[in-house]
Image: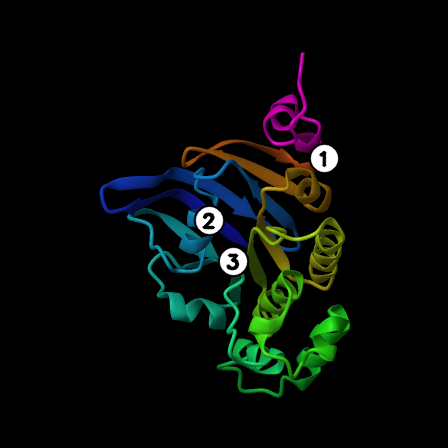
Amino acid sequence: MLIVKDAVVRYGAIEALHGITFEVKQGEVVTLLGANGAGKSTTLRMLSGLHAPSSGTITFEGNDVTKVKAHMFSSMGISHVPEGRRIFPQMTVQENLEMGAFGRKDNYDEDMERMFTLFPILKERRKQLGGNLSGGEQQMLAISRAMMSHPRLLLLDEPSMGLAPMIIDQIFRIIGEIRDAGTTVLVVEQNAAQALRLADRGYVMENGVIAFSDDAAKLLHDPRVRAVYLGESVD
């Protein structure tokens, strides 16, 4: 579904991504792991058109999207839930969801009800302002808003950040349900154990490069991952 080849991203004179290559297959959950500053969020911003690569290529469903502008990605089937959620705080829950469906020509009532089924608390809060929701509720809203555009590829940046363990479990369970319903997911996540238990495959980034990759189950038991990302000592 997605092929990134030799992609370089620069912020002025600073090179943030040094020629990364990876792929995401249809129907997978793939996770990008790495420390702060490794280039994970930059990778997602590149994939949603917010930072075009200075060299390299991005292919989505067989089409070269390397130079496509950011506002076109949603209509092409890619939705991005950024770090920090970025909901519209002065809009209600329902209005936020309607904004997620902006540009659709069909009736989206059924999709809104599906979001309320996935996240029942949002149905209870549908008339509340987004800014009055808890952190976990805002994350649920951000994911739901992204899903309202009918994405075939969902990009999630740190969905568990700042949330209580019980809410994190719920968020990841829902991500699994989204995948099972047919949406491919690429997730950046600091909680390596949680991400790898959900994902099919994973890539580990270090200093703007992909250091290594493997099936998620193998990465979960890889001594390098366990030492650096799970806080376990290795002999």
Q: Which residues are magenta?
A: 218-235
Q: Per the image, is 228 magenta? A: yes
Q: Is residue 151 above or below residue 225?
A: below
- Where residue 107 sits, quadrant-wise, is bottom right
Side of 63 relative to 118 (left or right): left
Q: Which residue is located at x 57 percent, y 68 percent? A: 146
Q: Which residue is located at x 45 percent, y 37 percent? A: 38
Report the front residue among 100 and 122: 122
Eye-nearest disc, 3 or 1: 3
Quarter the N terminus occupies: bottom right
Along the polypeptide, which appears first: circle 2 or circle 1?
2
Residue that extends furthest to the left in the rendered view of this protein = 13
**How many neighbours does mark 1 have within 10 angstroms: few (below 14), some (14-19), or many (20 or more)?**
some
Side of 86 relative to 235 (left or right): left
Residue 217, which numbered label? 1
Q: Per the image, is 97 magenta? A: no
Q: Pinpoint residue 15: horizontal percent, then vertical percent.
A: 30, 40
Q: Pinpoint residue 202: horizontal percent, then vertical percent.
A: 60, 39
Q: Pinpoint residue 183: horizontal percent, then vertical percent.
A: 65, 62
* Mark 3 touches mark 2? (CB < 8 Å): no
Along the polypeptide, which appears first: circle 3 or circle 2?
2
Along the polypeptide, which appears first: circle 3 or circle 1?
3
Q: CA distance from mark 2 to mark 1?
A: 23 Å
Q: Amino acid at mark 3?
A: Gly
Q: Is residue 28 above or below residue 96?
A: above
**SS for callout 2:** helix
User: Which residue in the structure is indicated by mark 3?
Assistant: 84
Q: Which residue is located at x 74 percent, y 69 percent? A: 118
User: Which residue in the structure is indicated by mark 2?
Assistant: 41
Q: Amino acid at mark 2?
A: Ser
